[in-house]
């Protein structure tokens, strides 16, 4: 059974028609025999909720400082509203779907994360351990898990977790075959064109010669790390309608597949 994890960002969640098309694509993957799960973010919705609450916040080293009130809002938005909107769309397409967060079943255990310069970010964490028991149970019984990255530490403190990092950590623990990052860019551009495939041993050289820059550097390094730890392939792709996910698993991929020889 092929195990596929799809990571979607908050900007994609709010794109017109995207959730319906993604749900159709996931239904097609399941009909082809795959087990599928989704990890999602929700930064845009969090910003809107904080604005509604007249809540000010700050960023340190590019990361949002998350105090107690902000963490309550993050949990409501991610594990509540955004998570259930995705589940609802999947159910409408006939997909057996269930929504959880890292908190449920102790699926993801986190620890406090400091900024790059060592400053306190409040309730911002990173995942240090994943318990796959609940996720494996869903997969074995044909349920698509929709996962909010909100997680807890061993003392029960709730943390805001970067969704990309959460997807990679969970994918490694579950030994996912294909981890797909659906992005607002079509893939990784090399020489001005989207590269269909990049072997992980090529990544550092591509960074060194300036072909890979900016935010794509940590994405590709994270992809390489996930593959080194057992994920078979990582995909970075844009969205081209309901056939995107099926095509991404084939030779007709329009995104970039990162792999190991």
Image: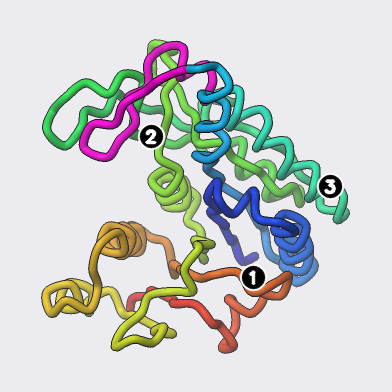
Q: Residue drawn at (46%, 32%), measured in percent from left and top? A: 108
Q: Position of residue 103 (x, y in %)?
A: 53, 25
* Mark 2 lies on residue: 129
Which residue is nearer to you in this view: 249 or 32? 249
Q: Is residue 206 above or below residue 3?
A: below
What quarter of the picture does the N terminus occupy?
bottom right
Q: Is 60 displayed left or right of 167 in the figure?
A: left
Q: Is residue 64 above or below residue 18?
A: above
* Mark 1 lies on residue: 245
How dense is the environment of label 2, judged by Cα within 10 Å: few (below 14), some, or many (20 and up)?
Answer: some
- Secondary element type, mark 3: helix
* Mark 3 lies on residue: 91
Q: Residue drawn at (63%, 49%), measured in percent from left and top? A: 13
Question: Which contiguous range is marked in magenta?
Answer: 55-74
Q: Position of residue 132 (x, y in %)?
A: 53, 40
Q: Are marks 3 and 1 in contact (CB under 8 Å)?
A: no
How dense is the environment of label 3, judged by Cα within 10 Å: few (below 14), some, or many (20 and up)?
Answer: some
């Amino acid at each position: 059974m092929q195990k596929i994890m799809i990571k979607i960002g908050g900007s994609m969640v709010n794109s017109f028609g995207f959730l319906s098309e993604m749900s159709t694509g996931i239904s097609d993957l399941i009909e082809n025999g795959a087990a599928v799960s989704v990890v999602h973010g929700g930064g845009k919705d969090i910003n809107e909720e904080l604005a509604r609450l007249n809540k000010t916040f700050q960023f340190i080293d590019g990361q949002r400082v998350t105090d107690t009130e902000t963490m309550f809002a993050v949990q409501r938005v991610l594990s509540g509203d955004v998570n259930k909107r995705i589940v609802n769309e999947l159910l409408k397409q006939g997909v057996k779907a269930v929504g959880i967060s890292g908190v449920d079943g102790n699926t993801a255990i986190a620890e406090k994360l400091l900024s790059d310069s060592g400053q306190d970010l409040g309730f911002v964490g990173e995942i240090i351990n994943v318990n796959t028991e609940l996720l494996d149970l869903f997969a074995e019984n044909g349920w698509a898990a929709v996962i909010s990255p909100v997680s807890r530490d061993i003392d029960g403190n709730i943390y805001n977790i970067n969704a990309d990092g959460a997807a990679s950590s969970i994918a490694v623990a579950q030994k996912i075959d294909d981890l797909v990052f659906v992005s607002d860019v079509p893939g990784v551009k090399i020489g001005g064109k989207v590269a269909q495939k990049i072997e992980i041993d090529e990544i550092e050289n591509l960074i060194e010669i300036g072909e890979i820059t900016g935010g794509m550097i940590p994405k590709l390094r994270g992809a390489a790390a996930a593959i080194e730890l057992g994920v078979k392939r990582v995909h970075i792709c844009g969205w081209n309608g309901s056939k995107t996910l099926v095509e991404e698993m084939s030779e007709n991929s329009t995104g970039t597949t990162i792999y190991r020889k």
